């Protein structure tokens, strides 16, 4: 079948075969199929959609477009993916917790873009830590420590990067089949048997409504099921930033505090929920899935795993014992409440944009970031507020300070009536 005929199949609402998708996608990766034909096909998918089997085949073709990690020599391999949010340092707490529970976390993580942070950027706040490992060292560390995190390989599902770049300039990004296949192609290529998805919902997330987030989660769950992976999803709130620290080094400090039995209560709650779902997917009993993650945190076992993981990848583990060693921006600016009442809402997107303005994020791939800057949130929704209370502290190096101040002043919405704190865990799907 020719490429125009393949485009016509989807234009008319037809269902693609594996051979058709391989011709189109792999031909694009190999430079045989031109981008203008793929762009036409993307628009046809955007308008006509794809069914579950078709989306799964697309995902598998994308996963097979480059290298695929072979984790068959490892036991209980697990992976976690977040759709992105503000203050989302979950991987820094969850992965050592899971390793302490006896499962293996051998995964690739990404860098941040725009207002959403990236795990690799956060970890690079630790002097010496490297996101690069040779294949042999990767597997050896996974076996010995149970935890290894490296940067995204350019050879992992290269079709995804090429297709996303084209989607970005053809107004075809917000398509559930294309979003789901983009995320899951990298997860399938990464090789883990169990995949847990943290699907964020709200102002600071890509999916703004619960219905849209649920549709995406169900699409990814179906891909996982049809591909033979143990897959679960947790829908979580991103109207409000996660935790109290936003910005790379600040978030690592908060993650260490959480691993030490302190830290923000919402961060701990989310990590425990994701750990429970992971262990359930791995076949642990309901009681063990609930209790083992708590023991890993409270006993200090998770912190020890984190320390060993940092040292194994060249990082200065003394920063884990003495988090005050992290370099934090010297400038301080406070945002204070102008009236008394109750905090009704804290706009996660505005907080993320404030960190971006300070230099703590990147607007274009490859940009350098300032690991030392960020924002500390001092009040969360439902808190009682008095005029003059400190709502946030900005840690800055002058860059973008005025913009960050304006964003944060508008981010806190104070009303006169008491309100209830919004739930963090919105729904669990398996």
Image (cartoon, rainbow, N blue to C red):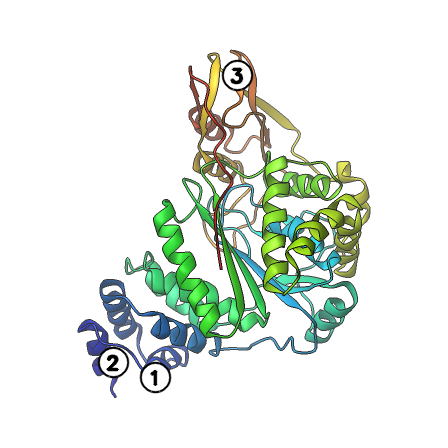
Q: Which residue is mark 1?
A: 23
Residue pointed to by mark 3: 385
Residue found at x 75% / y 56%: 100
> Which numbered tag is attached to residue 6?
2
Q: Is residue 254 visible?
A: yes
Crowd class of label 1 (few under 14; some 14 to 19; many from 20; radius 10 Å): some
Q: Which mark is residue 74?
A: none
Tell me the distance, in whole angstroms, between the alpha carbons under discs 2 and 1. 9 Å
Relative horizontal placement of residue 11, taking residue 403 as reference (left or right): left
Task: Give the answer, above or below, for where 399 lies relative to 274.
Answer: above
In the foreground, 61 or 324: 61
Q: Is residue 89 above or below residue 245?
A: below
**Residue at position x 55%, y 54% in the image:** 111
Most distant residue in the left direction = 12
- Residue 205 locus on image (x, y percent): 43, 45
> In the rendered view, does 29 fall on the left or right side of 361?
left
| Circle 1: element type | helix
Using the rendered view, name the quadrant where residue 104 is placed.
bottom right
Query: Do the residues under discs 2 and 1 have CB atoms within 8 angstroms?
Result: yes
Closer mark to the observer between disc 1 and disc 3: 3
Of mark 2 and mark 1, the one earlier in the sequence is 2
Q: Which element carries disc 2, helix, strand or loop? A: helix
């Amino acid at each position: 079948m020719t490429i125009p005929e393949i485009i016509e199949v989807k234009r008319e609402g037809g269902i693609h075969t594996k051979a058709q998708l391989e011709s189109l996608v792999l031909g694009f990766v190999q430079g045989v199929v031109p981008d203008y034909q793929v762009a036409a096909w993307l628009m046809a998918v955007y308008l006509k959609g794809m069914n579950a089997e078709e989306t799964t085949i697309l995902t598998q073709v994308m996963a097979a477009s480059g290298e695929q990690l072979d984790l068959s020599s490892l036991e209980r391999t697990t992976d976690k993916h977040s759709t992105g949010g503000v203050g989302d340092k979950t991987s820094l707490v969850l992965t050592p917790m899971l390793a302490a529970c006896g499962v293996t976390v051998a995964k690739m993580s990404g860098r941040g873009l725009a207002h959403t942070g990236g795990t690799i950027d956060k970890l690079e706040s630790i002097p010496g830590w490297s996101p690069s490992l040779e294949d042999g060292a990767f597997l050896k560390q996974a076996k010995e420590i149970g935890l290894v995190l490296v940067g995204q390989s350019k050879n992992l599902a290269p079709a995804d990067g090429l297709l996303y770049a084209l989607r970005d300039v053809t107004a075809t990004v917000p398509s559930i089949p294309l979003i789901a296949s983009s995320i899951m192609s990298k997860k399938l290529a990464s090789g883990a048997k169990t995949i847990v998805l943290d699907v964020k919902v709200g102002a600071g997330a890509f999916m703004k409504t619960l219905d849209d987030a649920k549709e995406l989660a169900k699409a990814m769950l179906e891909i996982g099921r049809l591909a033979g992976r143990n897959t679960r999803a947790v829908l979580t709130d991103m109207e409000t930033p996660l935790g109290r620290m936003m910005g790379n080094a600040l978030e690592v400090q908060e993650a260490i505090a959480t691993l030490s039995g302190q830290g923000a209560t919402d961060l701990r709650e989310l990590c425990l929920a994701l750990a429970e779902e992971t262990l359930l997917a791995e076949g642990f009993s309901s009681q063990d899935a609930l209790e083992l993650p708590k023991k890993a945190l409270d006993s200090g076992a998770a912190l020890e795993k984190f320390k060993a993981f940092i040292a194994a990848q060249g990082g200065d583990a003394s920063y884990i014992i003495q988090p005050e060693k992290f370099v934090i921006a010297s400038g301080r600016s406070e945002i204070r409440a102008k009236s008394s009442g109750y905090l009704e809402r804290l706009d996660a997107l505005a907080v993320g944009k404030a960190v971006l303005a300070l230099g703590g994020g990147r607007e274009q791939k490859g940009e350098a970031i300032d690991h030392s800057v960020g924002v500390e949130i001092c009040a969360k929704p439902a808190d009682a507020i008095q005029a003059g209370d400190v709502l946030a502290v900005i840690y800055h190096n002058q860059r973008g300070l005025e913009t960050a101040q304006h964003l944060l002043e508008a981010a806190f919405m104070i009303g006169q009536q008491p309100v209830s704190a919004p739930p963090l865990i919105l729904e669990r799907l398996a």
